[in-house]
Amino acid sequence: MIDLTPETLALSSRGLVVKYGGHAMTDPEERRAVLADVRELAAQGTPPVLVHGGGPAIAAELAAAGIASRFERGLRVTTPETLHVVERALTLLGKRLAGELGDAVALTGRDARLLIAERIDPALGEVGTVREVHAALLQLLLGAGLVPVVGCLAVDHEGLPLNVNADDAAAAVAAALSLPCVFLTNVPGVLDDVREAASRIASLSRTQVAERIADGRIAGGMIPKVEAALAALERGAPAAVIADGRVAGELTRVAHGTAGTRLLP
């Protein structure tokens, strides 16, 4: 077992939350390789929970329905009409991921009120931030040897559906289960220069994140990722790393501290 230190991410028998970004799973061959790594975690005694987004799949479904996509601060503005399409896309994608993983169950946060959220801002529409996680359901599935595959929908306290950012959902799940979280995306980590993949930053503190958001070096969809990673740490996750979800073996490299960007509290 790899000890949890400031330099490494612990992969233990307790488990690991893996957030799989929609943009990281568009290539079928790359997706199968990464899912094989997730499957290997379970085989080696590290039960994984897979929380997934679905940006490209959602965008394609919305375009087919003639609905324009609009974002504010990296979050999708979601009307009731948009939400219906989002749910369909995420549900189908979750079933596909669960099928490719094997011993897995596809859920969204609507199932058994797995994720309960509160609306963020009227300007964003039906978008929430996760406040509660039905952790016992996830623990039940893990105890049965099944990988929970969680799509990023939630319900409010009245049971009405809300779109939630997958990074936020993964952070909430990791905190509720007190597990490390790896955010897999379509870049090697946080980059010092977004045009240069080799400029990956090994670690960032909260202060450094704030400075880079202020000067524009962290922008767009990376903002909710770093904020979710820091939120996961604040809420009780023992570690949080942003890494590349397009290459096989990335989770092992993250565990040894040779890949991804580790967020520091």
Image (tube, rainbow, N blue to C red):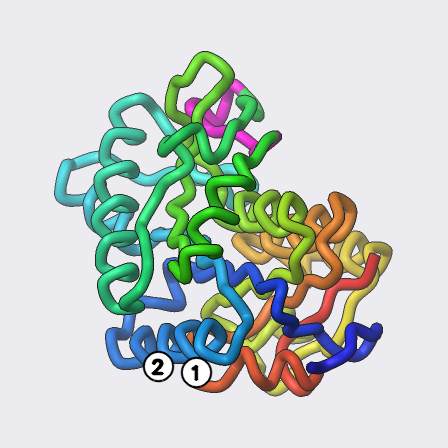
Q: Amino acid at mark 2?
A: Ala
Instruction: Judge by depth and name the residue closer to the eye, 20 or 69.
Output: 20
Q: Badges 1 and 2: C-beta atoms under 8 Å apart? A: yes
Instruction: Judge by depth and name the residue closer to the eye, 17 or 226.
Output: 17
Left or right of 75 on screen, residue 150 = left
Q: Which residues are magenta?
A: 122-131
Tell me the element at label 1: loop
Q: Is residue 216 magenta?
A: no
Q: Can you give x and y, in whole percent of width and height, for residue 52 in the image?
A: 41, 54
Residue occupying the point 31% across, 50% down: 106
Residue occupying the point 75% across, 48% down: 236
Q: CA distance from mark 1 to mark 2?
A: 7 Å
Q: Can you give x and y, in whole percent of width and height, for residue 74 in the image?
A: 52, 45
Q: Which mark is residue 239?
A: none
Q: Residues within 10 Å of mark 1 (few under 14, many from 20)?
A: some
User: From this viewpoint, which residue is outermost toward the top?
Assistant: 158
Judging by the rendered image, the residue that carries numbered circle 1 is: 247
